[in-house]
Image (tube, rainbow, N blue to C red):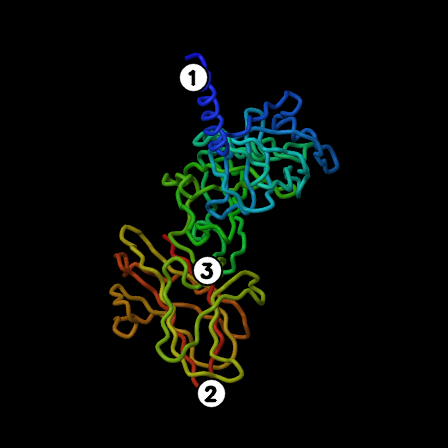
């Protein structure tokens, strides 16, 4: 009996070893416990930089929470990390699967602390090897500040909030910007827009032309913005994570015109404008040559010869109900011989210029005298159109033997 019992114990041990051997792939290696001298805060990390780049060639880690990621396309191969002491920009070697609210450890060996146009960054981070997630859904609340708080103090080269997630209340975009998009989605150029507060302090909001919201127009009211503080040399800039983090439906401190189309976004049809080719295929475009120095709408039927055409540029629909004394103004310039540009208005646009009833307003405007000379139209009284559904249109015509080049800018409706 004793012998049989010993055999049973041996069998059990062998079976156990076999099972452990079969399951060895599911056993994870022990997680390394970092010693105190292998962990650094973000504030201490920033202080490692003095005047030259610092290459970290030993084991060192920093913990923090991701406050801004690449999801919206406003950041590219860039993250922002924040802990209880400070914040810093992370430059990645490739795009990552790391998101806002992720709690992470960054293994710093092989990275460089550098100053990029006065923005302190941790450079050369391989997100697959050096970013280790510790948790998710741990978003940091933005710190409530003013524009004055985030500006660069006298005697310093850094904003005290560089890299941090902040919220600013009681701000609005300046009048010249509120009809613009966040960036240029056509050329995919980055663009600056200016925020102003109640004491006339300003700060730039810079957005990428590759962002998913590049072609959206800015909010026109007053309110709050949540963003990350960045810097380009001596200029503080804000980078938003999403337009949904702007709440700007309040009454503005600074009154602006009812509407402006200035073509600075280099997009003829942004904001609901429509172009229709009735004859030929000559289109309106944007340009910035000549004395005006800003972008404007332009049309010409000449390209190694004239082309017969009729092209309309139709405004979006306006509701002028309740505006006491609405007026329209714009700038025009032209050169070369050809038919004059025409201006029309309607309150019953059918979606087709040929079936719409238009009123000719051409004679109510002052037009350019030619030679590329710019002229202001003067204020065109719109008191007969204080209703909804109002649209304006410019009609350009050219023949096979002639055609002027026309330019239009600063199409403005105000009270």
Mark 2 — residue? 401
Sooner in the amino-acid sequence: mark 1 or mark 3: 1
Residue position for label 1:
4
Observer able to see residue 99 = yes
Residue 158, relative to residue 282: is it above or below? above
Q: Residue at x 46, y 46 (%)?
A: 72
Identify the residue at horizontal 36%, vertical 71% (top origin).
Answer: 276
Rendered location of residue 33, percent (x, y): 59, 23
Residue 237 image point, x, y percent:
56, 42
| Residue topped by disc 3 | 410
Alpha carbon of mark 2 to alpha carbon of mark 1: how far? 114 Å
What is the quadrant of the N terminus in the image?
top left
Point out the residue furthest to the right here: 52
Dot 2: element: loop
Residue 99: where, in percent of width, then height? Answer: 48, 38
> Horizontal placement of 291 versus 278: left or right?
right
Q: Residue 44 location in percent, x, y?
A: 65, 26
């Amino acid at each position: 009996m004793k012998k049989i019992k010993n055999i049973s114990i041996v069998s059990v041990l062998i079976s156990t070893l076999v099972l452990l051997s079969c399951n060895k792939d599911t056993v994870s290696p022990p997680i390394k416990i970092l010693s105190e001298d292998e962990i650094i805060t973000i504030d201490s990390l920033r202080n490692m930089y003095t005047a030259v780049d610092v290459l970290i060639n030993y084991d060192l880690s920093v913990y923090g929470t991701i406050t801004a990621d690449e999801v919206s396309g406003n950041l590219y191969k860039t993250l922002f990390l924040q802990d209880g002491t400070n914040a810093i920009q992370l430059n990645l070697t490739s795009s990552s699967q790391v998101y806002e609210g992720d709690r992470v450890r960054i293994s710093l060996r092989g990275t460089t602390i550098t100053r990029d146009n006065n923005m302190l960054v941790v450079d050369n981070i391989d997100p697959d090897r050096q970013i280790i997630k510790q948790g998710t859904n741990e978003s940091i609340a933005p710190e409530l500040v003013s524009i004055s708080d985030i500006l660069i103090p006298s005697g310093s080269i850094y904003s005290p909030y560089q890299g941090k997630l902040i919220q600013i209340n009681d701000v609005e975009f300046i009048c010249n910007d509120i009809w613009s998009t966040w960036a240029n989605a056509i050329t995919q150029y980055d663009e600056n827009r200016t925020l102003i507060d109640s004491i006339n302090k300003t700060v730039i909001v810079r957005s990428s032309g590759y962002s998913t919201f590049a072609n959206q127009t800015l909010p026109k009211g007053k309110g709050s913005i949540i963003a990350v503080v960045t810097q380009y040399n001596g200029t503080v800039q804000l980078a938003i994570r999403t337009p949904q983090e702007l709440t700007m439906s309040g009454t503005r401190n600074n009154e602006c015109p009812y509407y402006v189309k200035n073509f600075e976004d280099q997009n003829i049809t942004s904001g609901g404008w429509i172009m229709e080719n009735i004859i030929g295929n000559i289109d309106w475009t944007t340009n910035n040559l000549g004395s005006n120095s800003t972008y404007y709408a332009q049309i010409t039927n000449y390209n190694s010869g004239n082309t017969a055409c009729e092209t309309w540029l139709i405004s979006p629909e306006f509701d002028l109900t309740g505006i006491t004394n609405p007026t329209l103004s714009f700038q025009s310039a032209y050169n070369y011989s050809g038919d004059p540009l025409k201006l029309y208005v309607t309150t019953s646009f059918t979606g087709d210029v040929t079936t719409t009833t238009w009123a000719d307003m051409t004679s109510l405007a002052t037009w350019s005298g030619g030679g590329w000379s710019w002229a202001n139209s003067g204020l065109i009284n719109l008191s007969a159109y204080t209703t909804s559904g109002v649209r304006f249109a410019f009609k350009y015509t050219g023949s096979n033997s002639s055609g002027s080049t026309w330019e239009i800018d600063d199409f403005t409706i105000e009270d």
